[in-house]
Image (cartoon, rainbow, N blue to C red):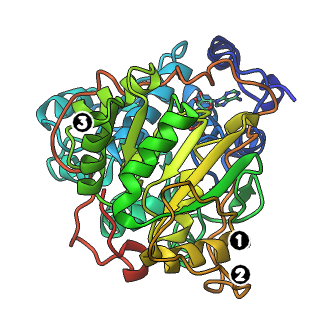
Amino acid sequence: MSFASLGLSAPILKSIAEQGYETPSPIQAKAIPAVIDGKDVMAAAQTGTGKTAGFTLPILERLMRGPRVQPNQVRALVLTPTRELAAQVGNSVAIYGKHLPLSSTVVFGGVKINPQMIKLRRGTDVLVATPGRLLDLYNQNAVKFNQLEVLVLDEADRMLDMGFIRDIRKILAVLPAKRQNLLFSATFSDDIRQLAKGLVHNPVEISATPPNSTAPKVEQWVCPVDQKQKPALLIKLINENNWQQALVFTRTKHGANRLTRHLEAAGIKAAAIHGNKSQGARTKALADFKSCDIRILVATDIAARGLDINQLPQVVNFDLPNVPEDYIHRIGRTGRAGASGQAVSLVSVDEFKQLSDIERLIKQVLPRKSVNGFNPTNNLPESRLNTRPLKPNKPKRPKAANAFGNTPRNNTGNTSRNTTGNNSGNRQNEARPGRSKPRPFKVANRSA
Ligand code: AMP
């Protein structure tokens, strides 16, 4: 199948060719014609499936046919949970729309609002925004929605996890009722379905892959270890296996900082990426990691979400996530686009419950390998697979691997996207704890 057969026009096909894309990914093959047709779409898709082009390309196609945008107006609105994702999506819009007479703008919190207000004055065809800042801009009359044709909620599950539901509802309330709605989410929990009910109408439902499956080419194993031995074990694993690029997940921001210090002290170049880091520091850490100037990127779940890092050979769970679905998100970072990867979890006895929940979710007991000298004094109990589902209607999620029918040229780690130049700021990721009450199970001990 070709992009041309999906109904895209020459200037868009030119941008696609310039990116080196040859074949549409499954999600693109389904979403592009549906969106061009004006249908609502509900898609199970995470980063790495080509979802951004899946909604951006057909939106641009539709917008190029419509009227000119008026001052302060917006024709297509893309809402994202984080600044990073907003910047990445904005970058994609700019790349794919390069040969079109359409404008795009990215707005997010943590940076001055005035320059954003000035940019919006002339109107913008595509606005990519995080919810909090968008509401601020709307309340100051900097943005108007009379001309709005399309709304995209990207990573809707993460927006709910981060407590944005109230902001989203406020935004929905001020949009014209007649519009096209596209909802993208890695998982489809009850909450997302509830949100979708009032949002999408007769949607085309797209799911690229079976629910809750991990990428098949990822070798996963568990390394039992005492909590206090974890930094030393990680250093040993990095050195002995000569890992050149690994993404390491910790549960907390402080844990990420502490571990980064341990690694640096052992002569391993590392940087932490989390919500307490300034936008500039995060962008730099990501760029340094992509260019291999640092070997280890230590991240919290929320900060890592939406990062466009392709084909990582190694993912390490320094701490197991409290939310079992996050395990799948994490290991989806490796073994992408047909490449193989390894995901190792350092598990101490106090994490046995999390381990059991993960194994229950992925329906397999993870193999264990002990490392000499690191056998735990507090033994990790044997796993017994619990085959009862965790909850009825567990979230469905696609796998990230093999999304494309071809080997993308830019899947080398030097991705076409970058967040550089998208301002800097030092406010937390857009989440505003306390603005709405997130579900207790989902957010327990979560920290960006
Ligand atoms: P996304 O899932 O939107 O985050 O995209 C993941 C990566 O795949 C990005 O680096 C895109 O540039 C790339 N990509 C998107 N569509 C294609 C395609 N059809 N062929 C090759 N690469 C693609």
Image vertical order of residue 420 relative to residue 376, above or below: above
Residue at 35% in and 76% down: 444
Determine the secondary structure under disc 1.
Answer: loop
Q: Dot 2 surroundings within 10 Å: few (below 14), some, or many (20 or more)? A: some
Three-letter residue code for mark 2: Leu
**Residue behind label 3 places its C-beta within 8 angstroms of ligand 1:** no
Which image quadrant: the C terminus? Answer: bottom left
Rendered location of residue 247, percent (x, y): 47, 41
Mark 3 to mark 2 CA distance (whole Å) = 42 Å
Query: Please, is residue 363 above or below residue 297 in the view?
Result: below
Which callout, 3 or 2, points at the residue further toward the start of the chain? 3
Q: Secondary structure at mark 3?
A: helix
Mark whose residue sits in front, 1 or 3 = 1
Q: Determine contact: label 1, label 2, CB under 8 Å.
A: yes
The amino acid sitting under disc 3 is Gln
Q: Locate residue 412: give its quadrant.
A: top right
- The residue pinned by badge 3 equals 279
- Circle nearer the N terminus (1, 2): 1
Taking depth in this image into account, of 394 and 268 the one nearest to the observer is 268
Going from N to C along the chain, the mark reached first, 1 or 3, is 3
Tag 1: residue type?
Answer: Val
> What residue is shown at x 61% (from left), y 85% (from top)?
391
Residue 147 placement: quadrant: top left
Residue 336: x and y, percent?
A: 67, 38
Picture layout, residue 179 above or below residue 203? above
- Disc ID at residue 365: 1
Which residue, given by chain and number where applicable, does mark 2 sit on? 385
Q: Nearer the viewer, residue 207 or 385?
A: 385
Q: Position of residue 443 (x, y in %)?
A: 37, 72
Q: Is residue 377 in view from this perspective?
A: yes
